[in-house]
């Protein structure tokens, strides 16, 4: 019964979405307020229905109802409860259900909290949101129904892919989807604005929190995925430029650009057409990511489903949504007149530079991801993609952007003075020199990029602090005045400072983990020791252990430095009972200087020892801390007062005071 | 009209991209014709993976009268992990020599990878610069070639050999080459 109830609720949600996407749109066009008023209750109802459907599927997983195909294919009675629940979205059908659930959740949030939106804008936003949802409901119901029954039901299920049975990955997809789908809000606002033919500061102020929320979730989702790859794949790496990773990175890049250009629209009433385009592109990248992962046009082990019928459906959906919105942009875009003019060297100019680099980076990642596919379509050619390509193209793009990132916030709106900005940045210049020289002195045999990375990290970190000090007028006014200025900083400014500073920390971590990793692979017998990066790893031995649905070999290492015992590491090599698939559980001990990372491999038949892999990954923890700081920054910015108070007034001429105080 | 052009550009680009996608969907991404089919394998002589076993891998290994399979792999390539059990299984069957060509990889990572997943290759060559890969027409790993006893390329598979591809594609080709040869 539960499966049928879920199916029924989902079908009803489709019909509610159809109503929500049509009546309010027509109503807004004809000025019929009763028709427009349908949007909000419909959005709430739609969310309620999808929540019921999602609850039903979760119930089927929790009770291990193997008469449902989806549960039988992806679950098992021995699986721990948390993975029974995460199994709901650990497969194609369930993850699509999660997608529409989140989409409806965002719509519901606009209906509930969007009280200060102009009625026509609100109606149109909700209608566009529902229109996209209709496509996804049809996709699920016609090609990927999670509620299909299986007869006769098997005695037990086929279990979830063991690599996915991990706490990090249990929460990775929901975070990622909250990000992906969250950008649908920015998209709906952009389309609604194109239909209304009006983009102003107020519009940007409404769009920003939604974009920011999506950006926070996407950042967290990508970081969780990267963290998972780091400790679960067991080879010390944290980013592989896999098509699926790229699929989440492209909306992040475009979304970051969107956040910055929306600021320009809000503060300076310019870059309107570009911001609208970015909003469309950002969500398109989310959709494209789904298409690439779900359709099987690119082969990847992440791909749950490689079904051409689904591929065709998603492609048609893409053409309607992206093609349709870009056509609307081509038609209505030219009527969006930007008011504010600005010099190339100005805050707007710096933000535009950020936008151009981010857009180029998005295009580069897209190109690298699609190149094999494009070449195939035109009959072949030769290029290698993978980390060599991305590292060669992506890093050089980021270097000038990070360099400019410290300068941009110090420039005035409209017309900036880069000499003055650079003069104020002398502490950052000093910090950069110290960082670069320090890196060169400490890691004498490291690659050149390591020095570049550290220089940039210190430059950006110190530059961000300089900008904060400037806003406090530190040193130019009595300290008490400066501190009270600091207290009065709007939360959005704190958000920028923290996000930029977090990135600086993250760059330091990525540089350390990317450029200075030390590794050692050998066969070790119990009692053997290996020296690595000044640490002594002693292999204590291995024993067999059992888990709920796997058996494992656990190897223990004792690590010491200069004769002082630091601790023990225990790594597991698991074999899952149902699939017979092995997974590695790396043993990691985190310190501020770097991670000690040990992995036990197979028994070596000749010597009776075990293959062991030992790594010293410098500064990895700073990568996660940096991401966390960025997320905290985003969250603080999200709680800024101006997002909560009533509808802001459009200012034709911002007062000069705003330029001097120069918030984000 | 000129003013509208920048606004039409995104739509145009997207439509071109969609056309590619549409064509891409009709193709099996793992079947790509190679200009090298029925040509002699390119000349190369690669050292073994630094610190690894064996004496390397060269063109001469492919001309010893036996059917060979050349598998291009890299530790940074995630699909390679998926197909590797099948490559090991193929080597265990003994129907053909299975050579590994380690493409644009770091020796430490490659060895760790082989240690973890098993190394059943007859021999492995390290192509650190990717120069040999260019001669082979590699444009994405993994790729797998089937070579006859005379050192001619007879088949190329792009993408991981997963699901039943070993049984339905690679093994029949090896058998056919053996039948033709006798």
Image: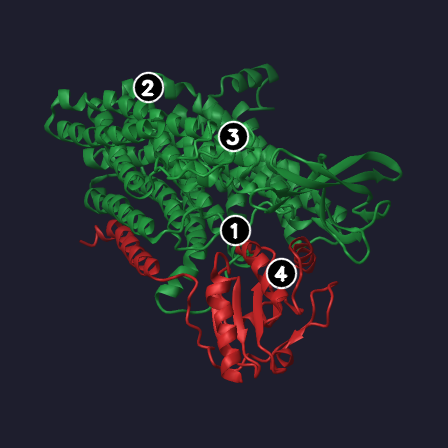
Number of other residues with Cα within 10 Å of mark 3, as a class: few under 14, some 14 to 19, many 20 or more: many
Question: On the picture, is A166 further left or further right than A60?
Answer: right
Q: Circle 1 — which element?
A: loop
Q: Indicate the chain on which mark 2 is placed.
A: A
Q: Would residue A497 be visible to someone looking at this image?
A: no
Spot the green chain and give its letter.
A
Q: Gap in Å between the C-alphas at discs 4 and 1? A: 14 Å
**Tags 1 and 3 both on a single chain:** yes
Q: Find disc 1 in the rendering and name its residue.
A: A241
- Residue at 35 percent across and 67 percent down: it is A378
Q: Would residue A140 be visible to someone looking at this image?
A: yes
Which quadrant would residue B32 be assigned to in this image?
A: bottom left
Number of other residues with Cα within 10 Å of mark 1, as a class: few under 14, some 14 to 19, many 20 or more: many
**Depth check, front residue: A645 or B74:** B74
Question: On the picture, is B15 further left or further right than A239?
Answer: left
Q: Is residue A637 above or below residue B3?
A: above
Q: Circle 2 — which element?
A: helix
Q: Find disc 3 in the rendering and name its residue.
A: A631
N-term mark: 1 or 3: 1
């Amino acid at each position: 019964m539960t499966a049928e109830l879920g199916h029924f609720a989902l079908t009803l949600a489709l019909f509610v979405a159809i109503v929500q996407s049509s009546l309010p749109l027509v109503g807004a066009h004809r000025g019929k307020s009763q028709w427009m008023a349908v949007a909000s209750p419909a959005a709430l109802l739609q969310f309620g229905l999808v929540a019921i459907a999602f609850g039903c599927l979760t119930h089927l997983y929790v009770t291990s109802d193997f008469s449902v195909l989806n549960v039988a294919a992806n679950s098992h009675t021995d699986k721990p409860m948390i993975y029974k629940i995460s199994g709901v979205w650990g497969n194609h059908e369930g993850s699509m259900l999660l997608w529409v659930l989140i989409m409806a959740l965002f719509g519901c949030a606009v209906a509930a909290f969007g009280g200060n939106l102009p009625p026509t804008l609100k109606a149109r936003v909700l209608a566009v949101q529902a229109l996209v949802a209709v496509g996804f409901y049809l996709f699920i119901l016609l090609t990927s129904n999670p509620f299909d029954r299986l007869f006769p039901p098997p005695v037990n299920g086929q279990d979830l892919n063991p690599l996915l049975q991990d706490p990090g990955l249990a929460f990775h997809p929901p975070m990622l989807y909250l990000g992906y789908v969250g950008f649908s809000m920015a998209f709906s606002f952009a389309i609604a604005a194109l239909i209304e033919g009006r983009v102003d500061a107020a519009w940007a102020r409404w769009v920003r929190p939604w974009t920011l929320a999506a950006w926070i979730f996407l950042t967290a989702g990508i970081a969780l995925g990267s963290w998972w790859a780091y400790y679960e794949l067991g080879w010390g790496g944290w980013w592989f430029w896999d098509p699926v990773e790229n699929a989440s990175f492209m909306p992040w890049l475009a979304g970051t650009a969107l956040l910055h250009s929306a600021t320009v629209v809000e503060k300076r009433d310019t870059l309107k057409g570009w911001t609208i385009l970015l909003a469309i592109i950002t969500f398109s990248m989310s959709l494209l990511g789904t298409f690439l992962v779900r359709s099987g046009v690119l082969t990847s082990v992440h791909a749950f489903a490689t079904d051409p019928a689904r591929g065709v459906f998603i492609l048609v959906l893409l053409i309607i949504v992206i093609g349709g919105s870009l056509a609307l942009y081509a038609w209505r875009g030219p009527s969006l007149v930007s008011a504010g003019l600005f010099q190339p060297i100005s805050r707007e100019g710096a933000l535009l530079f950020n936008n151009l680099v981010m857009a180029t980076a998005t295009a580069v990642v897209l190109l690298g991801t699609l190149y094999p596919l494009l070449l195939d379509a035109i009959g072949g050619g030769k290029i290698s993609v993978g980390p060599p390509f991305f590292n060669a193209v992506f890093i050089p793009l980021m270097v000038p952007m990070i360099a400019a990132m410290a300068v941009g916030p110090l420039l005035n709106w409209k017309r900036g003075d880069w000499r003055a900005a650079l003069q104020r940045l002398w502490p950052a210049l000093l910090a950069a020199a110290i960082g670069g020289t320090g890196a060169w002195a400490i890691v004498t045999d490291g690659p050149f990029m390591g020095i570049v990375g550290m220089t940039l990290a210190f430059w950006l970190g110190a530059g961000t602090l300089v900008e904060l000090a400037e806003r406090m007028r530190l040193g130019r006014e009595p300290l008490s005045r400066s501190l009270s200025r600091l207290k009065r900083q709007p939360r959005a400014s704190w958000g920028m400072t923290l996000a930029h500073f977090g990135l600086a920390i993250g760059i330091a971590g990525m540089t350390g983990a990317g450029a200075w990793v030390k590794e050692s692979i050998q066969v070790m017998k119990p009692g053997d020791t290996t020296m690595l990066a000044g640490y002594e790893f002693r292999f204590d031995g291995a024993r067999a252990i059992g888990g709920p649905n796997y058996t494992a070999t656990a190897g223990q290492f004792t690590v010491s430095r200069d004769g002082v015992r630091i601790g023990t590491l225990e790594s597991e090599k698991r074999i899952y009972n149902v699939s017979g698939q092995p997974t590695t559980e790396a043993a990691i001990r985190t310190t501020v200087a770097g991670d000690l990372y040990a992995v036990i491999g197979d028994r070596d038949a000749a010597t009776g020892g075990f293959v062991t892999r030992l790594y010293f990954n410098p500064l990895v923890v700073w990568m996660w801390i940096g991401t966390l700081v960025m997320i905290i920054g985003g969250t603080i910015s999200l709680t800024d007062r101006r997002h909560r108070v009533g509808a802001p007034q459009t200012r034709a001429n911002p007062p000069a005071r705003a330029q001097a105080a120069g918030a984000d | 009209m000129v003013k509208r052009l920048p606004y039409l550009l995104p739509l145009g680009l997207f439509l071109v991209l969609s056309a590619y996608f549409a064509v891409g969907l009709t193709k099996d991404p793992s079947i790509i014709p190679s200009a090298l089919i029925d040509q002699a394998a390119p000349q190369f002589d690669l050292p073994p993976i630094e610190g690894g076993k064996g004496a390397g891998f060269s063109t001469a290994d492919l001309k010893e009268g036996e059917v060979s399979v050349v598998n291009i792999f890299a530790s940074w390539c995630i699909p390679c992990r998926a197909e590797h059990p099948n490559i090991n299984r193929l080597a265990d069957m003994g129907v053909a020599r299975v050579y590994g060509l380690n493409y644009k990889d770091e020796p430490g990572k490659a060895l760790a990878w082989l240690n973890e997943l098993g190394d059943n290759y007859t021999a492995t060559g390290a192509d650190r610069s990717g120069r040999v890969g260019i001669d082979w027409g590699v444009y994405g790993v993994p790729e797998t070639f089937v070579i006859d006893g005379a050192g001619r390329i007879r088949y190329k598979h792009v993408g991981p050999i997963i699901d039943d591809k070993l049984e339905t594609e690679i093994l029949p080709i090896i058998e056919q080459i053996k039948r033709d040869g006798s």
